[in-house]
Image: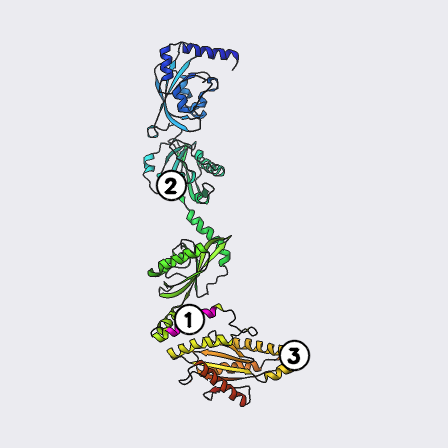
């Protein structure tokens, strides 16, 4: 401002203050916020205390104030034509947003009238009446007149509509709650939505999408919005649509929002686990199910009852657990997830045929970066074992015996030294522990049970001629040969020195005969090379089967040992039986 303008301004202020003490007092102490403005420059000549308080200004130099300090330049451009027509009588300019010094917007109704009309420079008096939000009406400048009450009536749906300046025209209550959740924002009709989005990259992304819709594009986008904290970043499917006015011009846009956070989380979890699950084959008889901390299925290798494996994803695994075991299953899942340690439990569950079966389930946490990501459940059908145990427990003596055997079996599992270190076959101690259990089962269900005791013919001569290291090679090769012929249910153990023993449960004597003959002939065909010599070996075997008078481990092994002696006496490289039988 140059000196002449300053003098003119001061002169105007002086002329105004000389209007009379009564008017000046009424203006200054009026509870309604007021301005006196120069119409040409829109500079403030005088303001009252009520306006300063409403707009948050203190100790203001009038030379620094203009209408732009109280209204946005866009709003001034809209009501400026009304200021050019100085009314004689006081009139309303409608509802406008007064800008607080802290950038908070306040809805007011503005009133205009001429002031100091005889002055060379026209002046105007503006009076503001603060409005409650429910009293304010959005000016029709470019707005699409949507019924906000309709939006308010839509519960459980996120929809909002903006004008061409991104100001809210309408929104549903769920959208308001969501904006409060992710941005801590209390949104209002007529406010610019972008002002509430505090994260710069989200704000730029939203503006870009709004602008595309305002140019007539229909958009459906999967987008993530919210604060940086994990709990406030939410995935949405946003559907943007332009809103057209009466003359066909685009006056705003509407956005339909669907929360797809859960879907995105499941997809992300599946991607994380994909590499790990490649090694799992569908041919594994056990159920292998991966779940999240809430028990929702992320992967399963088998159909779940009448639900295909793919369709079981996202469902609660306890849906297939018998009701009386659901609380146990959930307790074990929570413990595995929180402790990071393997848990286990037995429960009745439904298999893929819809049958209730007994399963032993192991819960193994999947830990990535020291954090449990999920839990893998491996469920093995133990119905047959449970039935056998229940049958055995039918008598007190059977209960005591079985408890003792199971205790020993549990201890046996903890002992890593149950195998022979040279040959890899079970050791003698494990054999005698296991045969006790098999004799009980054989007696209970009248199943056949046989023992084969065999050794290497003339093994001492081999050791003496070629050394003990070569003798060890022979024993290892014999064990490998025997293991290729026996079943998974058969037990091969090193009895001592070059003697080995095979426990053959649930197999007829004829089948046992064929088994030992296959083994004998296969060993007979083996050729060992040592010190430029080819060495061939043979074995002799004794076979004993459970009988009424042969009903203990000691008696069974003793009978097999007697039969082995008979085989040696008969010329070696053969098998003999106790009691004697003629098998060819």
Front residue of this view, candidates 215 and 55:
55
Secondary structure, magenta segment, majority class:
helix
**Above or below 43: residue 244:** below
Give the number of the mark in front: 3 or 1. 1
Q: Is residue 524 left or right of residue 39?
A: right
Q: Is residue 291 left or right of residue 539?
A: left
Q: Residue under circle 3?
A: 530
**Above or below 478: residue 577:** below
Is residue 47 something one can see in this rendering?
A: yes
Tag 1 or tag 2, which sits nearer the N-term? Answer: 2
Front residue of this view, candidates 449 and 316:
449
Give the number of the mark in front: 2 or 1. 1
Crowd around label 3: few <14 · some 14–19 · many ≥20 (10 Å): few
Is residue 221 something one can see in this rendering?
A: no
Identified at 34% across, 15% down, the residue is 89
Q: Residue under circle 1?
A: 406
């Amino acid at each position: 401002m140059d000196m002449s303008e300053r003098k003119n301004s001061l002169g105007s202020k002086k002329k105004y203050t000389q209007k009379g003490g009564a008017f000046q007092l009424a203006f200054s102490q009026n509870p309604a916020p007021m301005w006196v403005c120069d119409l040409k420059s829109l500079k403030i000549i005088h303001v009252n205390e009520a306006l300063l308080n409403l707009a948050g200004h203190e100790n203001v130099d009038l030379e620094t104030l203009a209408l732009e300090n109280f209204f946005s330049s866009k709003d001034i451009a809209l009501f400026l034509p009304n200021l050019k027509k100085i009314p004689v009588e006081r009139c309303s300019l409608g509802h406008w947003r007064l800008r607080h010094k802290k950038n908070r917007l306040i809805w007011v109704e503005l009133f205009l009238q001429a002031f100091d009309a005889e002055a060379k420079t026209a002046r105007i008096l503006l009076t503001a009446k603060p409005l409650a939000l429910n009293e304010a009406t959005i000016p029709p400048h470019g707005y699409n007149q949507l019924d906000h009450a309709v939006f308010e009536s839509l519960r459980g749906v996120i929809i909002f509509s903006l004008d061409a300046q991104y100001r809210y025209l309408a929104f549903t209550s769920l959208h308001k709650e969501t904006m409060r959740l992710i941005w801590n924002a209390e949104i209002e009709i007529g406010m610019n939505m972008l002002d509430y989005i505090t994260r710069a990259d989200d704000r730029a992304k939203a503006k870009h999408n709004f602008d595309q819709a305002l140019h007539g594009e229909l958009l459906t986008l999967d987008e993530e919005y919210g604060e940086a904290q994990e709990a406030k970043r939410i995935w949405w499917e946003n559907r943007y649509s332009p809103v057209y006015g009466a003359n066909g011009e685009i006056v705003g846009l509407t956005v339909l929002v669907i929360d797809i956070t859960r879907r995105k989380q499941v997809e992300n979890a599946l991607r994380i686990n994909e590499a790990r699950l490649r090694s799992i084959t569908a041919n594994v008889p056990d159920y292998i199910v991966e779940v999240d901390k809430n028990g929702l299925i992320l992967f399963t290798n088998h159909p779940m009852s009448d639900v295909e494996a793919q369709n079981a994803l996202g469902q609660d695994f306890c849906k297939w657990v018998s009701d009386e075991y659901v609380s146990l299953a959930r307790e074990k899942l929570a413990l595995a997830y929180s402790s990071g340690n393997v848990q286990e439990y037995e429960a009745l569950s439904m298999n893929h045929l819809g049958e209730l079966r007994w399963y032993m389930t192991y819960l193994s946490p999947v830990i990535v970066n020291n954090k449990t990501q999920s839990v893998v459940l491996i469920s093995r059908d133990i119905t047959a074992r449970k039935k056998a145990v229940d049958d055995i427990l039918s008598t007190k003596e059977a209960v005591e015996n079985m408890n003792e055997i199971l205790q020993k079996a549990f201890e046996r599992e903890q002992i890593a030294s149950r195998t022979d270190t040279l040959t890899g076959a079970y050791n003698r101690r494990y054999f005698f522990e296991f045969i006790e259990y098999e004799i009980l089962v054989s007696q209970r269900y009248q199943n056949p049970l046989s023992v084969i005791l065999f050794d290497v013919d003339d093994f001492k001569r081999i050791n003496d001629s070629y050394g003990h290291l070569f003798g060890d090679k022979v024993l290892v090769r014999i064990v490998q040969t025997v293991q290729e012929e026996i079943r998974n249910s058969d037990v091969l153990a090193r009895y001592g020195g070059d003697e080995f023993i095979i426990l053959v449960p649930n197999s007829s004597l004829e089948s046992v005969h064929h088994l030992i003959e296959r083994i004998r002939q296969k060993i007979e065909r083996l050729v060992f090379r040592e010190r430029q010599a080819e060495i061939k070996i043979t074995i002799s075997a004794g076979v004993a089967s459970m009988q009424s008078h042969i009903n203990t481990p000691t008696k069974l092994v003793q009978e097999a040992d007697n039969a082995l002696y008979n085989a040696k006496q008969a010329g070696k490289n053969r098998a003999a039986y106790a009691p004697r039988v003629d098998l060819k």
